Amino acid sequence: MNKAQLIDGMAEKAGLSKADSKKALEAFVATVSDALKAGDRIGLVGFGSFSITERGERTGINPRTKESITIPAKKVVKFKPGAELDEIIK
């Protein structure tokens, strides 16, 4: 599912126009992004939670040259599904 299909589905299920659904989705993404950037955890009961975790520096191999390279540490977004979502997708 891409962004346009998600907007269409949201509009249909919520009885909104596609324009309003697009605004709602963009507002959701912006709000979640801002909260994660600030280091907050977002918990949506029944759906799941988004958080930031630190991935440490590690050693990898360049597949082209087979040389050892250092992959720098970075922050990554982690999603953990809630119990209700976990049951739906099983």
Image: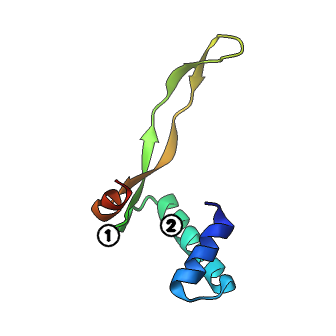
User: From the viewer's perspective, is 38 left or right of 87?
Assistant: right
Outermost left residue: 83
- The circle drawn on residue 45 is 1
User: Could you say where residue 29 lies in the image, as x and y percent from the top left?
Assistant: 57, 68
Decide: few, some or many residues near mark 2? Use Cα within 10 Å; few <14, some 14-19, many ≥20. some
Q: Nearer the viewer, residue 87 or 52?
A: 87
At x 65%, y 88%, the residue is 17
| Amino acid at dot 2 | Val
| Amino acid at dot 1 | Val
Judged from the image, the secondary structure of the residue bearing numbered disc 1 is loop
- Occupied quadrant, residue 1: bottom right
Q: CA distance from mark 1 to mark 2?
A: 15 Å
Closer to the camera: disc 1 or disc 2? 1
At x 38%, y 56%, the residue is 89
Outermost right residue: 64
Q: Is residue 80 above or below residue 43?
A: above
